[in-house]
């Protein structure tokens, strides 16, 4: 009985740890694409975009949040953003309007 209670307490605290855990998820920018193009995350998670091009710069612009586009990301540069509200958030690359993608926050 004591063992069972200890196990249950362990399992419950593990569950709580997992449900509170915020993740960091990576999106690559390569060959003029955001990969993956549609990404689903949990509220509280952070996305890190990494420019994996050899020479090309890009950026990550959420027009609904930022009036001005952010600085360019050169190869190897990163951009991160944490999402605390659920919804669908389309974004694009500032200098390349045809590069579009979406973040879905559950
Ligand atoms: Cu671009």
Image (tube, rainbow, N blue to C red):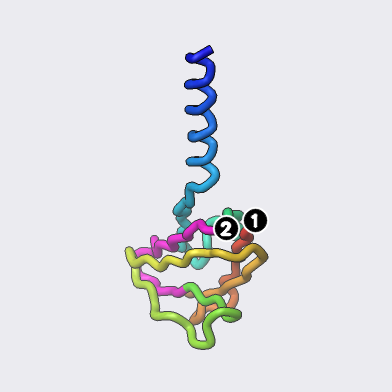
Quarter of the image with the C terminus is: bottom right
**87 and 17: which is toward the camera:** 17
| Rendered residue at 56%/79% (across/down) | 65
Q: Residues within 10 Å of mark 1 (few under 14, many from 20)?
A: some
Q: Locate residue 101: give its quadrant.
A: bottom right
Distance CA(mark 2)–CA(mark 1): 6 Å
Q: Position of residue 87 (x, y in %)?
A: 67, 65
Of the numbered discs in the image, which one, if any, rests on residue 106? 1
Circle 2 sits in a helix, a strand or a loop, which is it?
loop
**What span is colored magenta in the figure?**
43-59
Vertical side of 13 occupied by 101: above or below: below
| Rendered residue at 59%/75% (across/down) | 98
| Rendered residue at 44%/63% (across/down) | 49
Q: Is label 2's Cβ within 8 Å of ligand 1?
A: no
Of the numbered discs in the image, which one, if any, rests on residue 98? none
Q: Position of residue 19 (x, y in %)?
A: 55, 44
Is residue 49 one of those drawn in magenta?
yes
**85 and 51: which is toward the camera:** 85
Query: Magenta: predominant secondary structure element?
Result: loop
Quarter of the image with the N terminus is: top right
**99 and 16: which is toward the camera:** 16
Q: Position of residue 3 (x, y in %)?
A: 48, 14
Look at the numbered discs 2 and 1 and tell me whether their residues touch, using CB distance below 8 Å: yes
Circle 1 sits in a helix, a strand or a loop, which is it?
loop
- The residue tagged 2 is 43
* Earlier sequence position, callout 2 versus callout 1: 2
Vertical side of 72 occupied by 33: above or below: above
**What residue occupies the far front of the structure in this picture?**
2
Q: Is label 1's Cβ within 8 Å of ligand 1?
A: no
Vertical side of 68 occupied by 31: above or below: above
Q: Locate residue 73: give its quadrant.
A: bottom left
Q: Residues within 10 Å of mark 2 (few under 14, many from 20)?
A: some
């Amino acid at each position: 009985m004591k063992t069972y209670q200890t196990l249950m307490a362990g399992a419950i605290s593990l569950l709580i740890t997992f449900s509170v855990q915020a993740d960091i998820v990576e999106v690559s920018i390569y060959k003029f694409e955001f990969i993956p193009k549609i990404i689903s995350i949990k509220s509280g998670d952070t996305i890190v975009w990494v420019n994996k091009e050899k020479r090309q710069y890009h950026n990550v612009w959420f027009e609904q949040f930022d009036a001005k586009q952010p600085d360019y990301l050169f190869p190897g540069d990163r951009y991160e953003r944490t999402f605390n509200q659920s919804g669908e958030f389309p974004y694009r690359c500032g200098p390349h309007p045809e590069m579009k993608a979406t973040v879905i926050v559950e």
